[in-house]
Structure formats: structure tokens, C-alpha cells
Amino acid sequence: MALPGGMTLVGDFLQFVGVFVSFSIAYVAYRGLKQTESSSLLRLATAFIFLGFGFLVEGLVGLGQIVPALSLSATAVVVGGLLLETTGYFFLAFSHVVDVMLSKKTGVALLVFPIISLTGAQLADVLSILSFYFVLYGVVETVYSYARTRKPDTLLIALGLSLIGGGTFFQWLSLLYQYVGVLSLLQIILQEMGLLILFTPVLRFAMGGVKVNGPV
Amino acid sequence: MSYTRMSKLLSELVGSGLLVELNKDKISKYMISEKGIQFLAAYYSFEDFAQSFGLRL
């Protein structure tokens, strides 16, 4: 997933922005978990912790291209980062699956909605497609949730997830066409735009100034 | 809600400091405590946060 020339630095910086956003969301979800003991927030926190570490590993791999002393270009490390990312997207999708099953809606059928043909032999290829599938499922369920609650924030999150989904799609393409450097840059840009949108509930939560003296 | 279940819930809420029990003239009244108000505010905030991601607490 090499980027040409100076775009490497930009791409790497954006990966670390993704780390910050993911861990921020995980932190707020964790605080909510401690207060409410909600399993939904547990899954949300878990999802973004995995995503954060996935972006961190990918960022460090990118840093290795700029600072040779920190080179981490081993395939295992790259695949490890993708695995962490895919696990995060899985937990994000899984949160919606559990939510749907608990409410006994027929929406479980939406699980098969974004049917993608899996091709290719590389593990990274498969993980990228799985990420794409999980994110798309998250988009579908979030839009479905918006139809139920009519909260504008939910639609905004769906947009953010869509951009992340677009990013994971370009990530898959960049693995197939490794010499087309712009694909990796598009992946990172779309992913970061999506993550920044996902950061808006964190900002609103922080500005709300929620304070509780100790757990209940 | 049955009286037994309500009594149990009230007991738990008073025990966790979210409600304050006021006994006067052999009549028990319950009032939300400061901690209870803060907890409700936090709960609504986290509920709003979760709903942004299309999830429910």
C-alpha cells in the first residue's frame, strides 16, 4: 500500500488522526459503559479500540517508509493491522446484529443485504473485503435506525460510515492494483473524512459537560 | 407493575442513592436525589451518544 513521494507523509498523518478519533470514541463509550453497564456501549468501545490499534499499526507501517529505522514492512505486521481493523468493523456490525436480534425484528434479513463476491487468494484481500461488508452492514442498520428515530445525528453517522466503507473499498482495490498509488490516498482520505464525522457525537458529548460523582 | 416488584426497585434505588426516602406521618415519599439527577443527565447523554451510532442502550 505504498504511496508515491510526499503523499506518504500526509497519508501517515491521517492514519494517526484516525487513531485519535477511534480512541476518543472508545473512551466515551467506555465511560458510558461504566455508568450504564450497557452491552451496546461495550461492543462500541471494543469496536473502536480494535479500529484504533488497527490504524496505529498501519500508521507505524507507513512511518517505516519515511523513517527506515522504524521499518515494519513485514507482511505479518501489515496483515495484523488489517486484522485488527476488520475485527473492529466486525464488532461494529455485530452491535447492530445483536440490537436487531434483541428487538426480534425481521431486519436480521438485512445481514445478507450487502452481498459481495469474495475473490482473490491473499489474506489481506479477504480482510479488506470483510471490512467493506461489515461497514456496509453498519451503514444499512444505521440508516434503518434513522428511519425509526429520525435523529439527524444518526443519518450523519450513516454518512460517516459510508465514507469509511468507500475507504475500505479503495483499500481493497489498492491491494489489487498496488502500483496505483492514488488508490491508497483515496482510501485514507475517505476513511479520515468518515472518522471525523463519527467524531461529532464525541464533541457534542464533551461540550455537554456530563459529570457524575462516582459509579452508581 | 406489581407492588412487590415496585418495592424491590424502590429499595434498590434508595440503596444506590438515586432516590431519597422521606417518611412523614407514616407516609413514605420518594424524591430524586442530586446523584439521581446527575445519573439521569449522564444516562440521557450516553443514550444520545449510542443512538447517534444507531444503537440502543
Image: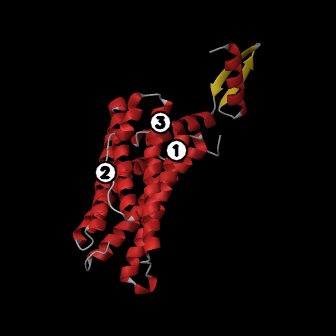
Relative vertical location of residue A84 with respect to residue A71 in this rendering, above or below: above
Amino acid type for the residue under numbered disc 2: Ser
Marker disc for residue A41: 1
Query: Which sits earlier in the primary sequence, circle 3 or circle 2?
Result: 3
Relative vertical location of residue A204 with respect to residue A141 in this rendering, above or below: below
Name the element at disc 1: helix
Name the element at disc 3: helix
Separation of marks 3 and 2 at Cα, in angstroms? 26 Å
Disc 1 to disc 3: CB gap under 8 Å: no
Q: Is residue A41 left or right of residue A178?
A: right
**Quadrant of the rendered image containing residue B6:** top right
Residue picked out by circle 3: A99
Separation of marks 1 and 2 at Cα, in angstroms? 31 Å
Chain for disc number 3: A
Question: Residue drawn 22% across and 71% down?
Answer: A180
Give the percent coordinates (x, y) of residue A16.
Answer: 40, 67
Separation of marks 1 and 3 at Cα, in angstroms? 11 Å
**Circles 1 and 3 on the same chain:** yes
